[in-house]
Amino acid sequence: MASEIKVYLVKGKMMVAHDKFPTWSKFEIYVRGMKKEHAIERVYSELGSRHKMKREHIKIESVEEIPLEYVSDPSLLKLLEINGVVKH
């Protein structure tokens, strides 16, 4: 049985300043995943890699599946068109 890749909109806050006066900034990220849990892990991975953030500095507030017709990110749409992986 083949599973379908879905698109999730993940919203939350991340701590952008770690000094005496921590500052939280809101974010919204569209990610692909098979399940909601996969989308959450992807957000932790991307924010950790891109901004050198620890998981404790990322607070996920909501995760919702988005119908494909509402996706406007061209790079995400291109990835959704891929049917399979070719190994050489």
Image (cartoon, rainbow, N blue to C red):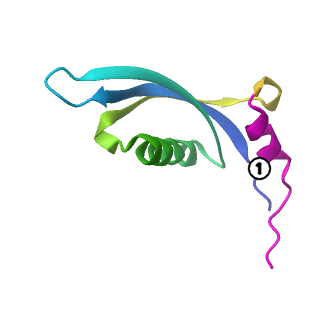
**Where's residue 51, x and y in %?**
41, 40
Q: Nearer the viewer, residue 9 or 45?
A: 45
Residue at coordinates 80% horizontally, 65% vertically from top-left? 85
SS for callout 1 = loop
Q: Quadrant of the N terminus?
A: bottom right
Residue at coordinates 71% horizontally, 42% vertically from top-left? 6
Q: Is 22 positioned to the left or the right of 77 in the image? A: left
Residue at coordinates 78% horizontally, 34% vertically from top-left? 74
The number of numbered badges drawn on the structure is: 1
**Residue carrying label 1:** 4
**Where's residue 36, x and y in %?**
57, 41
Place residue 70 in its image quadrant.
Answer: top right
57 inside magenta stretch: no
Range shown magenta = 73-88
**Where's residue 59, x and y in %?**
37, 31
User: Vertically, is 15 above or below 21?
Assistant: below
Check disc 1: other Cα within 10 Å, few if <14, some if 14-19, many if 20+.
few
Q: Is 3 positioned to the left or the right of 65 in the image? A: right
Type of amino acid at the residue the image marks with label 1? Glu
Q: Is 20 positioned to the left or the right of 30 in the image? A: left
Q: Nearer the viewer, residue 76 or 62?
A: 76
Q: Quadrant of the C terminus?
A: bottom right
Q: What residue occupies the far left of the structure in this picture?
A: 20
